[in-house]
């Protein structure tokens, strides 16, 4: 399932999707249609763990939560332009 969770004035969209194992991954869709997937370092790799972007700022910073291998939730702030 693909779930968009945020859009900024530039038209960049963030959200998450589940893979075949139920793991959450983040995505960024730029205005030109380019889609980049990402996982926050430290995010778990078992079912219902992973990365969950919640929004994107006008400057492109992505914020959200990730669930680690011990099922503990953490917040994150990600600067994708540094990729």
Image: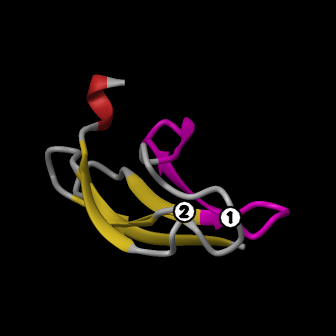
Residue 55 visible to the viewer: no
Percent position (x, y) of residue 32? 48, 36
Image point (51%, 47%), residue name: 39
In the rendered view, tell whether residue 10 sits above or below residue 1.
above
Q: Mark 1 points at which residue?
A: 23
Q: Which of marks 2 and 1 is nearer the N terminus?
A: 1
Q: How far apart are marks 2 and 1 (CA)?
A: 11 Å
Q: Please name the residue shown 24% across and 39% down the image.
A: 79
Residue 4: x percent and y percent?
Answer: 50, 69
Residue 38 spot, x, y in % from top left: 51, 43
| One can see residue 68 in this view | yes
- Which residue ends up furthest to the right in the rendered image? 20
Q: In which quarter of the image is residue 83?
A: top left
Label 2 Cα neighbours within 10 Å, binned few <14 / some 14-19 / many ≥20: some
* Left or right: 49 as drawn, with respect to 41: right
Residue 35 in the magenta stretch? The answer is yes
What span is colored magenta in the figure? Answer: 17-39
Q: How far across and how far down the image is residue 76, in percent? A: 27, 57
Give the vertical position of 49 relative to 82 (above or below).
Answer: below
Q: In the displayed structure, would residue 13 be above or below residue 83?
A: below
Left/right placement of residue 61 relative to residue 41 reads: left
Label 1, secondary structure: give it.
loop
Tag in front: 2 or 1: 2
Instruction: Please tell me how crowded label 1 is: few (under 14), some (14-19), or many (20+) other residues with Cα within 10 Å.
Output: some
Q: Mark 2 points at which residue?
A: 69
Judging depth in this view, the residue of 73 and 3 nearest the camera is 73
């Amino acid at each position: 399932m693909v779930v968009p969770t945020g859009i900024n004035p530039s038209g960049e969209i963030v959200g998450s999707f589940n893979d075949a194992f139920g793991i959450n991954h983040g995505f960024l869709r730029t205005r030109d249609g380019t889609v980049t997937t990402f996982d926050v370092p430290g995010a778990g790799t078992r079912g219902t763990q992973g990365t969950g972007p919640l929004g994107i700022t006008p400057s492109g910073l992505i914020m959200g939560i990730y669930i680690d291998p011990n099922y503990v939730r953490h917040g994150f702030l990600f600067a994708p332009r540094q990729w």
